[in-house]
Image: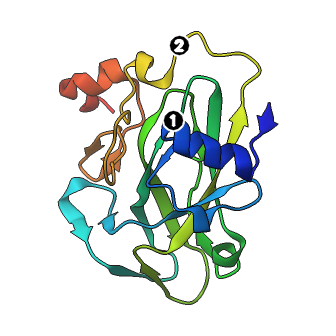
Amino acid sequence: MSLLNDKSIELNCEEIGLVKPFVKENLQPNSLDLRLGDEYLVDCSFETFNILPEKLLMPGDFILGTTMETVNIPRNLAGRVEGKSSTGRIGLMVHSTAGFIDAGFCGQITLELKNISNKPIMLHSGTPICQITFELLVDEPSKLYGDCDNHYQGQCGVQASKYPLVDGVYHVTDKKVQEDQTTLGDF
């Protein structure tokens, strides 16, 4: 795989809509900064959805956020979302494990925001919060992200996990068990 540079990122944004809206000022040598949106899931369930221009993240807090931008990954690329050094230096994690973006994915990026510092962090929508890189694939995949009945394809705004929360416990299980809620009572 080869990492795209600023010229290739800009060209792909302009020609195929790789990232919309494309903000040229957020272009870095090998990445593009993405901005924080104004939607948050505070306890990662749909009951505590907030739309706010700013959000105070206390030490140890974990919330889901979203990017303002939508990405449209073509079949010959994969993407990676990472934190920025300036946010990392104050103890803000932007993803815990879900930084990889498959070929074929289209949608806004849900961010897993965690304050690992000992001081509160005020998040402001519109601020560059993370960066995305793009890798050219050696070969195109046989199927794209959207071809696999993927849960998050086309997401707009913050999306909660596909795993069900039952009686205050997340159940990490396969789709067949998820669809049969009576099976979940056997845990």
Q: Residue 126 location, x and y as percent? A: 43, 73
Q: Position of residue 186 (x, y in %)?
A: 28, 29
Q: Mark 1 points at which residue?
A: 16
Q: Which residue is drawn at 42% across and 80% down?
A: 124
Image location (x, y in percent) of residue 184: 27, 31
User: For mark 1, does the 10 Å Cα neighbourhood hold few (<14), some (14 to 19), or many (20 or more) residues?
Assistant: few
Nearer the observer, 16 or 85? 16
Question: Residue 80: in sight, yes or no?
Answer: no
User: Amino acid under label 2?
Assistant: Lys
Residue wearing tag 2: 143
Which image quarter holds the C terminus?
top left
Distance (Cα) linking label 1 and label 2:
20 Å
What is the three-letter code of the residue carrying label 1? Ile
Compared with 42, 152 (above or below) is: above
Q: Which residue ends up furthest to the bottom in the rendered image? A: 119
Q: Quadrant of the N terminus?
A: top right
Q: Residue 115 vs residue 4: left or right? A: left
Is residue 27 left or right of 102 when viewed as pictured?
A: right
- Image coloring type: rainbow
Q: Is residue 70 above or below residue 65?
A: above
- In the picture provided, is 12 more to the left or to the right than 152? right
**Residue at the image position 65 percent from the left and 61 percent from the top:** 27
Q: Secondary structure under badge 2?
A: loop
Secondary structure beneath disc 1?
helix
